Amino acid sequence: MNWLNAEHIITAFGPYFVFAVTFVIFLETAFILTSFLPGDSLLFLTGLTLSTTTLWLPDWAGFLMVWLAAFLGTQTGYWVGYKIGPPLFERRNNWIINKKVLAKTHEFFEKYGTRAIVLARFLPILRALIPMLAGISKMDTKRFTKLNFFGAVLWIGVFMFSGYLLGNVPLVKENLETTVLLIVVFTTLLLPVAILRDRLSNRFAKRRS
């Protein structure tokens, strides 16, 4: 079983592929050690498969299951950081884990919190890392949950729903890998561009003052 290949995951489980996708998406968003699993491409192919295949499971149920996996996975990552993060920083003090790093992490979320949580959805590895860091920095739970809810909806909408809508377009079918790659590249740039724009704006504001 090749868990790194999105297409193989879907074909291997046949009519029950939604359960496999749900499991993979939860793991990919919840834990750093499993963040190497396919995310964006898996969502796109899942939406495409739902639109082109007749299953015993209604399409809306497939969307709901995958969305829940994305939401609960990120929420799990947050609680892991929330519970084990602070004790870890108190027990250890080195160049990686120390109170200065914790303070900078907290400062980062104070400045970029909203965008970081939502846009990190579109960055592999950071999808699992950012929620954990938010928990470590004790970001407000209600605020994080709201952002997580919106981020999961946006992520599923961009990849899974676009796959569902474009699944029957001949041009997309013939250039599937290129289509997924273009969407991934575009969405991956959202958070870095937002942070870069803020920094350039701050520098420009300081020069003017």
Image (cartoon, rainbow, N blue to C red):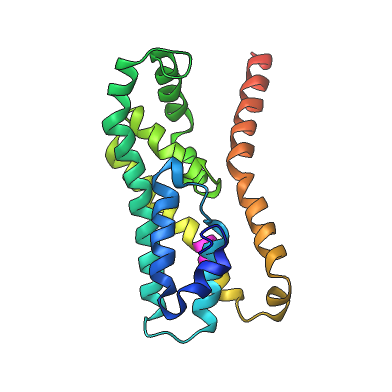
The C terminus: image quadrant:
top right
Q: Residue at x 42, y 78 (%)?
A: 59
The verdict on residue 116 being magenta is: no
Q: Is residue 139 left or right of residue 192?
A: left
Which residues are the magenta region? 157-161
Q: Is residue 161 visible?
A: no
Q: Residue at x 26, y 32 (%)?
A: 83
Quadrant of residue 129 in the image?
top left
Q: Is residue 29 visible?
A: yes
Picture coordinates of residue 166 (x, y %)? 61, 74
Picture coordinates of residue 79 (x, y %)? 29, 39
Instruction: Farthest residue to the front: give it.
Output: 1
Query: Magenta stretch: dominant SS?
Result: helix
Q: Give the camera-side residue of 206 and 80.
A: 80
Picture layout, residue 24 above or below residue 127: below
Picture coordinates of residue 78 (x, y %)? 34, 39
Q: Residue at x 36, y 54 (%)?
A: 71
Quadrant of residue 80 in the image?
top left
